[in-house]
Amino acid sequence: MSTMNISLPESLKEFADNQARALGYGSSSEYMRELIRKDRDRQCLRGLLFEGAASPQSVRIDSDSFDQFRSRVRDTAHR
């Protein structure tokens, strides 16, 4: 694993330390790694959403489509 040192104002360091304790992380480093992973995942999802929004529409979505989707979700949830 690589090491990265960052400088934080005391108020941010205290916040990170308090969050790490409150959320059950073993250290502030674990908390920071999780924040970075979540940001990476958020950016990936954002890219996928933009990609989907830019793609041509292949199926017309109407209220019947949503009703069918809801039924499939309910069927899956009850299994």
Image (tube, grey):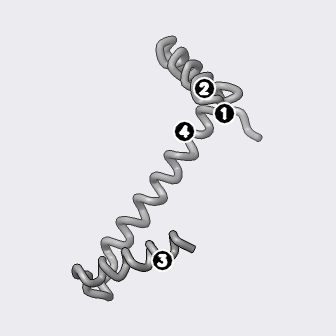
Q: Inspect the image, locate mark 3, and give the three-letter code of the amino acid beneath it.
A: Asp
From the image, state whether disc 2 or disc 1 is nearer to you. Answer: 2
Q: Earlier in the sequence, mark 3 or mark 1?
A: 1
The answer for how far apart the CA atoms under marks 3 and 1 are is: 38 Å
Closer to the N terminus: mark 2 or mark 1? 2
Dot 4 and dot 1 residues touching (CB under 8 Å)? no
Dot 2 corresponds to which residue? 20
Amino acid type, residue under disc 1 in the picture: Glu
Task: Quickly name the residue at label 1.
Answer: 30
Q: Is residue 44 above or below residue 19?
A: below
Measured from the top left, where is residue 19 in percent x and y? 55, 24
Q: Are marks 3 and 1 in contact (CB under 8 Å)?
A: no
Mark closer to the chain start, 4 or 1: 1
Q: Residue at x 73, y 38 (%)?
A: 2
> Residue 18: x, y in percent?
56, 19
Q: CA distance from mark 3 to mark 4?
A: 35 Å
Tell me the SS state at disc 2.
helix
How much space separates mark 4 and mark 1, taking CA atoms?
9 Å
Amino acid marked by disc 4: Leu
Q: In the rendered image, which quarter is residue 3 located in?
A: top right
Q: Which mark is residue 75?
A: 3
Q: Which residue is mark 4?
A: 35
| Dot 4: element | helix
Among the two numbered marks 2 and 3 on one chain, the one whose residue lies closer to the N terminus: 2
> Which of pointers 3 and 1 indicates the residue nearer the eye?
3
